[in-house]
Amino acid sequence: MKYDKARIHMFRVPENAELVENLTKYAVKNRVRTGWINVLGSVIDPVLGYYDKARGEYLKNKLEGFYELVNGTGNISLKNDEPTVHLHVAIADRNSHVYGGHLFEARVFMVEALIIEALGDKFLVRRNIGGNLWAWD
Amino acid sequence: MKYDKARIHMFRVPENAELVENLTKYAVKNRVRTGWINVLGSVIDPVLGYYDKARGEYLKNKLEGFYELVNGTGNISLKNDEPTVHLHVAIADRNSHVYGGHLFEARVFMVEALIIEALGDKFLVRRNIGGNLWAWD
Amino acid sequence: MKYDKARIHMFRVPENAELVENLTKYAVKNRVRTGWINVLGSVIDPVLGYYDKARGEYLKNKLEGFYELVNGTGNISLKNDEPTVHLHVAIADRNSHVYGGHLFEARVFMVEALIIEALGDKFLVRRNIGGNLWAWD
């Protein structure tokens, strides 16, 4: 999909919010139906996912404690007409070692967010077409 | 270079495509000559590069198996008048350990891509000026 | 904050420059007061930070040598009316192991940068409101 107009959102996610949930709420409230996400900051008790292809399901690794949020990369698209957030993150511990994967949840200590909202008549839609994938009519 | 107009591209890269090649094809087909790339998803058998400054060449680490694509950051510019993709990636294994570097190649399992196409009369050009660098006339 | 206009900056940071300082200089020179940063490339002797929540201060890890700059994610906002850069990075060694955190400093070998400048009347402001946070009047 191509969009010739975009709106830039830059904001701080509230402390103690759950990151994925809060970004989703932001998208719903601000009617962002298609967009790209970048975040950085620091988070607590993140739960990271790795897709186990053989089993067809996510493994979850719960990491305890405080981590620098080195990078979060994700997007917003519509699933059953609702804005849905898909976010991958890289996080670092006190020795600067980095862990990462699909983000299931994390508590926000301090997160700064960018959303590039794609403006237009057509939205990206996520459907179950052999996986939870972006589909186009 | 500064650009007052941009076009947002958001799309899914086809399963089993080679990621760098496919992004390059996309740029050629859609005439993207200068742009920024962000990707996330999952990839298979990625080949990562580390530039060995002393030898003046890339070392390659071939990682086998399935990895979460935590983040890919890159760009499109012109080299010999052709769109060229430069992409660095961070990938995570099933223990959420992260590996990264210059991406030589990777097979796509599921990749979602953003390209911010810079629109204007001037393009970023990559030349051999003591390295494969962006140059401006 | 929402911005309906943006300017795209894409440029190469000069070799041997200190990365954070140079991006700050770029922002000052080009009057970028609110923007988002993405970088990739390679850096030398990076100093990474981890915020020690209990002590209320950053721990610094100085890594020696040459690293691929896998991803840098950050932003520009105003602090005491001056453009300030906040940048987190993921870097990789020759074994493709990744380290990351808040970037205090790093010498540039080759860095390619994107800045998405948010254009408008209102700027993001960083203040000491129980931390060095984005604040809005």
Image (cartoon, coloured by chain):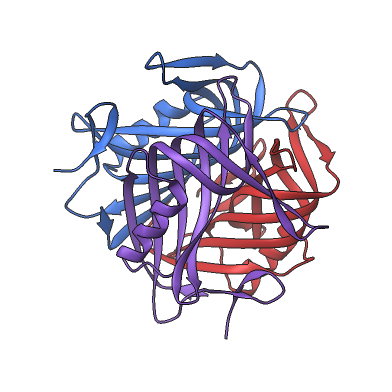
Chain colours: A blue, B purple, C red
Residue A98 image point, x, y percent:
67, 31
Closest to the observer, C6 or C92: C92
Count of numbered circles in the view = 0
Check the image and report above or below for C7 versus C41: below
Q: Say which quarter of the image contains residue A29.
A: top left
Look at the image and tell me whether residue A18 can be seen: no
Q: Say which quarter of the image contains residue C128.
A: top right
**Residue lying furthest left:** A137
Closest to the observer, C113 or A42: C113
Residue A21 image point, x, y percent:
40, 26
Residue A32 image point, x, y percent:
29, 43
Q: Residue visible at 73% across and 26% down?
A: C53
Residue B27 image point, x, y percent:
37, 62
User: Split into 4 quadrants, where in the image is the C terminus of chain A?
Assistant: top left
Check the image and report above or below for B21 versus A58: below
Q: Residue visible at 66% across and 18% down?
A: A65
Q: Is residue B70 left or right of residue A6?
A: right
Look at the image and tell me whether residue B28 can be seen: yes
Q: Residue visible at 41% across and 73% down?
A: B4
Closest to the observer, A8 or B34: B34
Q: Is residue B121 left or right of residue A119?
A: right
Check the image and report above or below for C121 versus B125: above
